[in-house]
Image: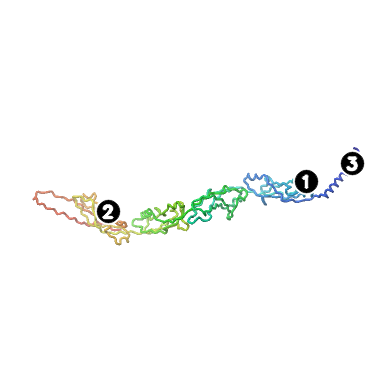
Amino acid sequence: MNKIFRNWPLKLLAAIVAVLVWFVIMSQADPADTRTITNIPVTLTNTDLLVRQSKSYSIEGGNTPTVSVSVRASGSVLRELSASSFVATADVEKMMDLTGQVPVEVVCTNPNVIAGQITLLNPSVKIIYEDIIQKFFTVTVRSRNELPDGYFVGRLTSNPRTVRVTGPVSTVSKIGSVIAEVDVSDMTERSEVEVPLQYFDDMDQQMLLENYKDTSVGTETVTVAVDVFTMKELPVVISREALDAAKASLPDGYRCTNIQQSVTAVRVSGLRSRLAELVSVSIPEGALDLSGATESRTCVLELSSLLPEGISLMEGEPDEMEVLLQVEPLIVREFEVPLKKVKGQQEGFRYIYPETISVYVRALEADFIGFDPAMISVEADLGEYAEHPGIWSLPVTVTCSDSIFTPLSSRSSLRVIVEEIIIPPATEEPETTEVPEEPSESTAEPAETAPAD
């Protein structure tokens, strides 16, 4: 034991020198160096924190962030290192909200490299995050290609009419329109087709939403209903009810003499089953108004409003129609005509009245050319005056066989003298009887009547 500790200072010095010599020899054989290793992928952790807050995120510079490190180690160790020798993580929970910077931590899987030998050249990654929103868009339906000859595309409707899009604000705000395009080339009747939805931005550039992060839609397809119409030409007619109502609205003393319409026929389109029921476009009662008219009047009608539901005017057809109603004043003429009959005469009374009477007829001035008074018939009825002697003015009934002439019965009257016939009592004179002379009817002067208007 004494031999071991004998000259121990010298022995300790010799050991230290030996170690130093070993280090010198080893450093010369495997010297230390520094190496930069790039493209080490960074894994984000706790990203569910953003999802729970309805946030969408992206990483500045790309969706797969990388970092670079500088390592100080011996040459033999450095030669063993690569990007796969390091594990880099960025914990979102440690993100600085104002800048979006998330610190990166790197460890080396090589046991010969410790943390102190590693220097991070870019110690953080930047996260860009934004709100996730929902927005509803109205689906616009378009037809593609042409229908067979004689058929036309009518109403296009989609079910559902709107679609929900969920995604980042920057993505959803880009969407300008949602289109459902249906091919109609083989359709000859109403059809329903399942059609995929297409999304376009404000510049009409298509957006493939499946390529946008955190973006989803409520439905990828809609059912499009296509109404296939056929064409039919229909006459435009003024109904009897409309014409009668217009004439009835004229003030007294005027007549509608002619009707001219700017449109006599139109082409319309609609479902074949509905068009089969239509024979004309009818102007209804109340559409033409001549109230207060003392001269010709033009009525403007909107043809589309007169069509049944589901029927529409073909492109290029006029929607407005003008109806010219010609109005002319009536004049009154006086005629002396024979009295046809006096009704209600009783036995035992004598009735004296004129054989002719003045009557007044109203019509257009042109209609009186060639007018024959023989078309007029005048009758009177004694009524309650038949058995009452006196001088009476009776109303008369004036008729005309031609309806274009309007007799004004109220302007004429018949002056009648009613006398009771008294038979004297028999006497005892000789039986020779003298046949009394029957009094002859005398023609009285016609009663004064008001002059014609």
The residue tagged 1 is 112
Circles 2, 1 touching at the beta carbon (< 8 Å): no
Instruction: State the residue in front, 316 or 194.
Output: 194
Q: Describe the element under mark 3 as helix, strand or loop.
A: helix
> Is tag 3's residue or tag 1's residue first in the polypeptide sequence?
3
Q: Return the mark for residue 8.
A: 3
Q: Give the amino acid at mark 3.
A: Trp
Give the alpha-carbon distance from disc 3 to disc 1, as whole Å.
35 Å
Q: Looking at the image, what colour scheme do you see? A: rainbow
Circles 3, 1 touching at the beta carbon (< 8 Å): no
User: Would residue 411 be found to the left or right of residue 83 on screen?
Assistant: left
Image quadrant in which the C terminus is located = bottom left
Q: Mark 2, residues whose alpha carbon is within 10 Å: few (<14), some, or many (≥20)?
A: some
Instruction: State the residue in front, 244 or 413.
Output: 244
Q: Mark 3, residues whose alpha carbon is within 10 Å: few (<14), some, or many (≥20)?
A: few
Q: Give the amino acid at mark 2.
A: Thr
> Is tag 3's residue or tag 2's residue first in the polypeptide sequence?
3
- The nearer-to-camera label among 3 and 1 is 1
The residue tagged 2 is 397
